[in-house]
């Protein structure tokens, strides 16, 4: 859950904006970020794209101390 919060904040999004971008209620996203609910893999893929992160980042056990993961970029 902490990695979800970290990725959202690194993307510069608040809960409401992030939830809107992936067609999710802000309440559900907050519950996921608190560890009270689980994100389906399809939604996690959408969050990864929205947050400009590789999917594997969301499977880390701890929040990165810095921003080591390369950002996903679209081909030119």
Image: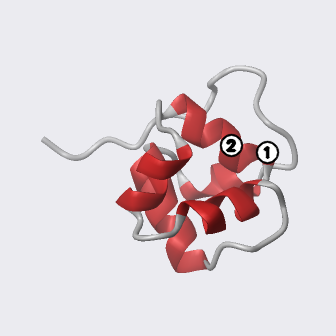
In percent of the image, x 36 and y 58: which residue is there? 21
State the SS at label 2. Answer: helix
Location of residue 57 with respect to 13 vertically, above or below = below
Mark 2 neighbour density, 10 Å: few (under 14) some (14–19) many (20 or more): some
In percent of the image, x 74 and y 74: which residue is there? 38
Residue 58 pos. (x, y %): 68, 54
Q: Is residue 12 left or right of residue 9?
A: left
Location of residue 30 with respect to 28 vertically, above or below = above
In percent of the image, x 47 and y 37: which residue is there? 13
- Residue 28's quadrant in the figure? bottom right
State the SS at label 1. Answer: helix
Residue 66 pos. (x, y %): 70, 20
Q: Is residue 65 left or right of residue 23?
A: right
Count of numbered labels shown in the rendering = 2
Check residue 11 in the rendering and tell me which mark sits there, or answer none.
none
Q: Is residue 61 left or right of residue 41?
A: right
Q: Is residue 29 left or right of residue 74?
A: right
Q: Quadrant of the N terminus?
A: bottom right
- Residues at marks 2 and 1, CA–CA distance in whole angstroms: 5 Å
Q: Nearer the viewer, residue 23 or 55?
A: 23
Q: Which residue is mark 1?
A: 2
Q: Are marks 2 and 1 in contact (CB under 8 Å)?
A: yes
Q: Quadrant of the C terminus?
A: top left
Location of residue 11 with respect to 32 vertically, above or below = above
- Residue 29's quadrant in the figure? bottom right
Mark 1 neighbour density, 10 Å: few (under 14) some (14–19) many (20 or more): some
In percent of the image, x 58 and y 33: which residue is there? 9
Q: Which residue is mark 2?
A: 5
Location of residue 3 with respect to 46 vertically, above or below = above
Residue extending furthest toward the left: 76
């Amino acid at each position: 859950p902490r990695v979800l919060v970290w990725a959202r904040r690194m993307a510069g999004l608040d809960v409401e904006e992030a939830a809107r971008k992936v067609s999710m209620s802000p309440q559900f996203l907050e519950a996921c970020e608190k560890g009270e609910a689980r994100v389906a893999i399809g939604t996690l893929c959408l969050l990864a794209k929205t947050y400009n992160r590789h999917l594997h980042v969301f499977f880390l056990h701890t929040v990165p101390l810095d921003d080591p993961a390369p950002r996903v970029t679209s081909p030119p």
